[in-house]
Amino acid sequence: MEDREAKNMENSMGISSFTDHYFPIGFFDAPATTGGDGSFFDLLGLQSIFDIPPLPTPPPPPLTTAPPPESSELSNPPATPNSSSISSSSTEAAAPAGEERVKGEGEDDLEKEKKTMKGKKGQKRPREPRFAFMTKSEVDHLEDGYRWRKYGQKAVKNSPFPRSYYRCTSAMCGVKKRVERSSDDPTVVVTTYEGQHTHPSPVVPRGGGGGGGSISASAAVFAGGGGGFSLAPQLTRSQLEIPYFRNLTSASPLDFDRFSVHRTSTAVSPPSSMMRDHGLLQDLVPSEVMREET
DNA sequence: CGTATTTGACCCGCGC
DNA sequence: GCGCGGGTCAAATACG
């Protein structure tokens, strides 16, 4: 239970401490999905992955009103800060979104989802799009601006490290995330986000004055056709190194066809700044790509 | 006291 | 049909 302290720190205010504990490293890993030419982005598969849209109207955060993720659409973001790499995957997301559960009455999505599993067995539970990335970090649970509640832990086959399951604490948000260490490299943490946040990041920039901290510094959202994710941002870019994308679930082919990138206003930065600061994206996406917004 | 974590049990899908 | 592995539930417990 000593970890607890550390965890609490991360959970509650992670950000700052976060940077202290995590140090993203950058290592490359050839994307299993794309056969890059060798260029950095090819390597990352960015070009084929992202379809940077013009940061339309900053679809900002009034997310609370956003309808719950009923279908497998995502658009919100899990953020992840010290991630040194990103990858994503999801395909199963394309499932029939409509599975109603036998008892969907007074339960919210979350409940529904879980019950879905147990409830009707005839139907397959449509998986939400998933987005995974690897991070070199000493701590398992990376702070990403959202609050998560751990609801399970399981031993992983072929790995000495357990996998932890987290769910966004927000009532109507059914986003889940799995965190596990790579058995190959214990220093690497694999984080997988599933679903989309239907609310803005609870972690608000510390106000007032001091500001800006890392939060406003960067926040990127990867919104995809079927789903979107935000890359987090509470890390200053200087702290991040080169991320690498990696196909993590061999079982599920990547589904990047409609990946797009746009910013999420963590509430702090006005739209104008959004245009200028793409946070991690600036590092990840070549300016040519980014400038779609013009 | 409220909230978050721990942890064993349970459920489900899948491969054999 | 059975066993295995992954994912989730929920009671107990810890912590602020």
Image: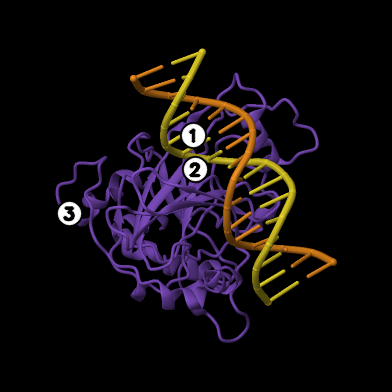
Chain colours: A purple, B orange, C yellow
Quadrant of the drawing holding the C terminus of chain A: bottom left
Labels in figure, total: 3
Left or right position of A105 against C15: right
Residue A126 visible in this rendered orientation of the protein = yes
Q: Secondary structure at mark 3?
A: loop
Quadrant of the drawing holding the N terminus of chain A: bottom right
Left or right position of A275 against A46: right
For the view shown, which residue lies furthest in the left direction? A37
Q: On residue A227, which mark appears? A: 2
Other-residue count near label 2 (Cα within 10 Å), few / some / many at <14 / 14–19 / ≥20? many
How far apart marks 1 and 2 lie (CA) works out to: 9 Å
Mark 1 touches mark 2? (CB < 8 Å): yes
| Chain for disc number 3 | A
Mark closer to the observer (1, 2): 1
**Residue A44 location in percent, x, y?**
26, 52
| Chain for disc number 2 | A
Give the residue type that dot 1 points to: Ala
Q: Measuring 59% from the left and 34% from the top, which residue is drawn there?
A: A71
How far apart marks 3 and 2 lie (CA) works out to: 26 Å
Q: Nearer the viewer, residue A111 or A65?
A: A111
Give the residue type that dot 2 points to: Gly
Left or right position of A170 against B16: right
**Residue A61 location in percent, x, y?**
62, 59
Q: Measuring 53% from the left and 70% from the top, which residue is drawn there?
A: A10
Q: Measuring 67% from the left and 44% from the top, which residue is drawn there?
A: A67
Mark 3 touches mark 2? (CB < 8 Å): no
Other-residue count near label 1 (Cα within 10 Å), few / some / many at <14 / 14–19 / ≥20? many
Q: On residue A39, which mark appears? A: 3
**Same-chain status of marks 1 and 2:** yes
